[in-house]
Image: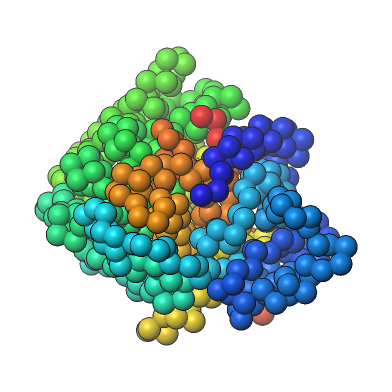
Amino acid sequence: MHNLRFRWLAVLLALLFFAAACGGETTGDSGDGADGGTTTQPRATAEDDTTEADPGDGGDAPTTTASDAADDATGDDMPEPGAEPEPNIYDDPRGGVFAAFQQGFDRGDHPFLQYDAFCVAHDPAADRVDTDDGISADSIKVGHIRSRLEDAARIGFAVPVGDPKEMFEVFIDYINEECGGIRGRMLDLGYAEAELLGDDVEVSRNAACLAMTEDHKSVIVMNSTGFQGTANVCLVVEQETIFISTQGQTEAFMAGGNDRLLSLSPTLEESLRFMVTESLDSGAFDGLTLGVAAPDTPGQAEAVEEALVIPLRDAGFEVVFDVINCGGTTICFGGGPESVTNMVNAGVNGFFNVLNIISAPGYIAEMANQGYEPGDVQFFASDFNSQTSELVAGKITENVGAGNLYNGAKIIDFRTTGEYRDPAFEPNPMADMCNRLYSENSPSGAGHDWRDLGDSAYGMVGSVCGIVRIMARGLYDAGDNPTVADVQEAIANLGPVDNNAMSPASIRPGKTAMADVIQTLDFSFPCYQPLPFERADDPDEEPDKAICITGRNDFRPAPR
């Protein structure tokens, strides 16, 4: 097992100094642009001596094979016997906190840590035995719960993210067929679905929990399509199973999970605290009467009150706080018009959007219906209910009045949303590698391009890829004959981890919400910012006028 945890502790200090020195210049500048930043290749192993690593589209980085390594290991470059190997570090061309993070991330020859190979074939463990529920001598059971995003299409909220079920299957099959599983044990992937809409959403989610734990005996369960509410407790507390998700969760759920609940996002409270801390420091709330309408989804209204309403009131601000009734579903409309009336009567001119993809558009449209005009109210948002996503926030603009009202919303978040609008943008090596592997191995022939507007499947592939790699790292690092407890200890001590954006993220005991940086982003509607790749293809084409969320590239360590 590689000692990544201590390297990451060191890089936290580097992040602070680097951010101050660079003044936020972290993207769009690749230095001399000669090699796309991929200056150090994964160490070759005996198992991959016929496979050449492909760095993708990001530049002319050299590739390394085992035979190349053998040729190079001669002459003056021959290491001294017993010498420590050179660190295997990705040189991130974005600089700033990105480069500082990578400097503390030695990938060594770990089969699930290379940035230009999803996994590397490795020797099976000898003398494998059955060790625990879900772990036999020859297999390890893992699970995938998919929320039925297609349900949203019935009410006009189609979510074009491709086929997550196939994505998980492709990456799991690749580990089994090309990389020898996990130390010789093949991954056995279970699958369950959970409803997104209807009167029994919580029942459906809890049923999916039981299907993946009691029935399938999964050691780790994964989700990339959103999973909220009490079913998280079912997974990580009642069933004591590791759950890896993209969605931010409440701190009560995280604490109760005892490091078994992992998220690519900050906790819900952290997303709000980051926004409050940064905005108070910048004076963004000065002179505003503030309002927020929170959903009564289990744990969410409590998180909003604790991390947003109380700190703002303690800072001397008047805050109108309403809770919207969701009726046990994801559609939170109960009391919405009355809440908007409360905002109007109180003179609210600063509003926090914490509602979900289905509920926020209706609430903001009601604000327009009740007389709010563009410029009357400053909106603020964060990753709470994924409101940094162009796919999610874009639904607000389907009502033009709501879109015009929401124009100019200020967002504080960890995501790199909108970076593809930078003329210098190239996908990072991991996003490119993951999407290339999926398109080459998809049974349906699916393939996705980051240039396809309105299609969020490219990003979904990257999210699934990152989740599966984190899962595989935890299983691998648990050793030759791990128990479930060994796996849980290993995954809580991974240290730095890869996500779709290759931005700073880490896991350590007591901290399993992975994102470690934030930036300021702006919501624009209509969006007239040209898309460089479209303009290059057709210079006469009108720029995109739908929506854009663009970051200011002022990335800094999250104020935890």
- Where 156 falls versus 317 (above or below)? below
Q: How many marks?
A: 0
Q: Is residue 146 visible?
A: no
Residue projecting furthest to the right: 76
Residue 154 at what x, y percent from top left? 23, 67
Residue 394 location, quadrant: bottom left
Q: Is residue 164 above or below residue 79?
A: below
**Rendered location of residue 43, percent (x, y):** 65, 64
Q: Residue at x 35, y 38 (%)?
A: 259
The x and y percentages for residue 423 are 70, 64
Residue 484 visible in the snapshot: yes
Residue 298 located left or right of residue 287:
left
Q: Quick check: 303 above or below 84?
A: above
**In the image: residue 297, left or right of residue 71:** left
Residue at 31% of width from left, 35% of height from top?
Answer: 258
* Residue located 41% across and 80% down the image: 442
Residue 128, given in percent of the width and then of the height, sits at: 34, 62
Is residue 381 found left or right of 62 in the rendered image?
left
- Give the camera-side residue of 368 and 285: 285
- Front residue of 99/460: it is 99
- Seen at 43% across and 21% down, the residue is 312
Quarter-of-image position of residue 559:
top right
Q: Would you place residue 135 above or below residue 487 in this image?
A: below
